Image (cartoon, rainbow, N blue to C red):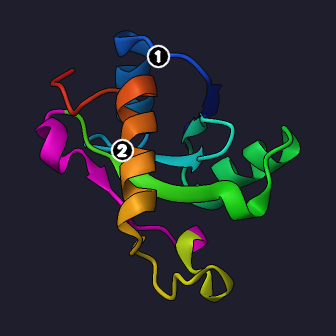
Amino acid sequence: MSDIRLITAKIDKDELKRLVDQGFKDMVKFTVDVKQRRIALGGELHADGEQLLLENGSEQKDIWGANYYPGRGEAGCIEYTSLVNIRPSQGNDSMEITSKDLKEKIEEITFTLIGKGEIL
């Protein structure tokens, strides 16, 4: 399907559009390392991005999955749902991230590295 980019700085709008168009057309999956503040963007499965982060020195406990929807604005561009988020040992029993603090961290990193839901 689509390739995965490891990003540590703001992604170029054209590159983001390419990843969205290459995959699901209206959104792109991403996994974020909340400690190292970097994102694996693209791919068919969150697990693929998770694997890329692990191969590049991230720790499992710091990696969370979400989906980014360009064109939905700040309030609606992030969906905090992924199979990689099921972590009973970290107090997250579902696919959706339940921690408000964790969501805020992910939002801040997403807005910095991907965008705030602007139209592409």
Residue 29: give its label. none
Residue 45 visible in this rendered orientation of the protein: no
Does 62 appear above or below 49?
A: below
Q: Position of residue 63 (x, y in %)?
A: 64, 56
Q: Are the two marked residues, 1 and 2, in contact with CB atoms closer than 8 angstroms?
A: no
The quadrant where residue 8 appears: top right
Please tell me which residue is depicted at 17% across the width and 38% down the height of the picture. 74
- Asked whether residue 80 is drawn in magenta, I would say yes
Q: Position of residue 80 (x, y in %)?
A: 37, 62
Residue 43 visible in this rendered orientation of the protein: yes
Which of the image's four quarters has the N terminus? top right
Q: Nearer the viewer, mark 1 or mark 2?
A: 2
Q: Amino acid at mark 2?
A: Glu
Q: Which residue is mark 1?
A: 10
For mark 1, give the secondary structure: loop
- Between residue 80 and residue 21, name the one nearer to us: 80
Q: Which residues are magenta?
A: 71-84
The quadrant where residue 86 appears: bottom right
Q: Which residue is mark 2?
A: 107
Q: Position of residue 48 (x, y in %)?
A: 68, 53
Q: How many residues crowd mark 1 within 10 Å: few (<14), some (14–19), many (20+)?
A: some
Q: Amino acid at mark 1?
A: Lys
Please tell me which residue is depicted at 69% across the width and 37% down the height of the picture. 36
Question: Could you tell whether 32 is left or right of 47 in the image?
Answer: left
Does 88 appear above or below 12?
A: below
Q: Position of residue 18 (x, y in %)?
A: 41, 22
Please tell me which residue is depicted at 65% across the width and 48% down the height of the picture. 49
Question: Could you tell whether 112 is left or right of 65 in the image?
Answer: left
For mark 2, give the secondary structure: helix
Which of the image's four quarters has the C terminus? top left
Does 73 appear above or below 105?
A: above
The quadrant where residue 7 appears: top right
